[in-house]
Image (tube, helix red, strand yellow):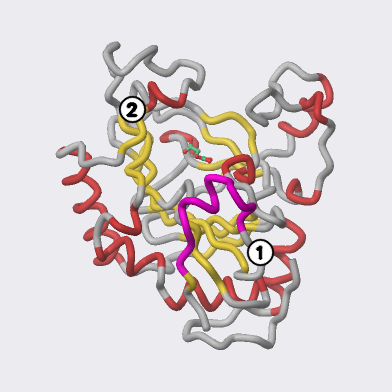
Amino acid sequence: MQMNQAKTSAMGAALSAQQIAQFETDGYLLFKNMLEPAACVQMLAVAQQQLHAALPPLEYEAELGYAGAPASLDAEGGRTVRRLRGAYDRDDCFRNWARDTRVVAKLEQLFDEPVCLTLAHHNCVMTKHPQYGTATGWHRDIRYWSFTQPDLICVWLALGDETSANGGLKFIPGSHRWDIADEQLDELDFLRPEHPANQALFAQGISVDLQQGDVVFFHSRLFHAAGVNATPAVKTSIAFAYHGCSNQPVAGSRSAASGDVRLTA
Ligand SMILES: O=C(O)CCC(=O)C(=O)O
């Protein structure tokens, strides 16, 4: 991914050369307090209404099949929602956030080219429910997409506090630059928990605590994970993913079928 500090064609605070270098080194960048509380409260209210109404399209824990998930939709806890999918088309508050010039300007610097939003995967309100919300193993998000280059960026907005207590994100800094042997990964591209070579990688994982309005950008090759939610409250975040417009989805893939939104000229 090419980085260019000088180019800031859209509105919004520009990234410094140091921030750009930090993203390149660590694979993520944290922005404290990027979004004002009123906007977070509004998104949270809409998300809660839509969760309550089970407004489709939804992804359920039972469909993910992660360890500890309810065995089927009809099992106890089977209708626990993991994602309110298609956030971009759910409500203007989510769409406006996806297009927020503070976000897009920073992405344009990191990609050094016009920015597109992918409507394939992520593009969601991500929830982690107490009791039936499952942990996510160490993985790279690029497993969700098929693009010419594996260089997408996820923009994750916390609508409330996110810590290890409620299943907050953990990152392995710098892991977006690693080459990993196939045998270290399982069939879904998660790092195998039992593989001896992976133990030293897991030890490098750090928790990234977020508060309402904090935003973290992370590279689609960055290994990350999250635990269960041991608190009584649902954790709610918004996740959109972006790519440079020259980096096109592979023809015939789900990424291509879902479409993109071009956000800069
Ligand atoms: O909230 C989680 O469990 C992790 C979410 C995540 O990393 C993903 O869905 O790719």
Front one among 95 and 160: 95
Q: Any mark on residue 130, and which?
A: 2
Q: Is residue 259 magenta?
A: yes
SS assignment at label 1: loop
Binning the other alpha carbons within 10 Å of mark 2 as few (below 14), some (14 to 19) or many (20 upward) gives: some
* Residue occupying image coordinates x 30% and y 57%: 89
Kind of residue indicated by mark 2: Pro
Residue 118 placed where, x, y %? 50, 58
Residue 59 placement: quadrant? top left
Q: Is residue 238 magenta?
A: no
Kind of residue indicated by mark 1: Asn
Frontmost of labels 1 and 2 is 1
List the single residue furthest toward the front.
252
**Label located before the other in sequence (1 or 2):** 2
Residue 72 placed where, x, y %? 35, 14
SS assignment at label 2: loop
Residue 90 placed where, x, y %? 26, 55
Left or right of 250: which side holds 159? left
Binning the other alpha carbons within 10 Å of mark 1 as few (below 14), some (14 to 19) or many (20 upward) gives: some
* Residue occupying image coordinates x 72% and y 65%: 22
* Residue occupying image coordinates x 70% and y 56%: 148
Residue 42 placement: quadrant? bottom left
> Which part of the image, by quadrant, shows the N terminus?
bottom right
Task: Name above or below for residue 146 compared with residue 134.
Answer: below
Query: How far apart, in angstroms, are the residues tagged by discs 1 and 2?
Result: 38 Å
Q: Any mark on residue 247, and which?
A: 1
Task: Name above or below for residue 16 compared with residue 157.
Answer: below
Task: Name above or below for residue 57 compared with residue 241.
Answer: above
Residue 132 placed where, x, y %? 35, 22
Left or right of 73: which side holds 23? right
Instruction: Identify the magenta region.
Output: 249-261
Residue 144 placement: quadrant? top right
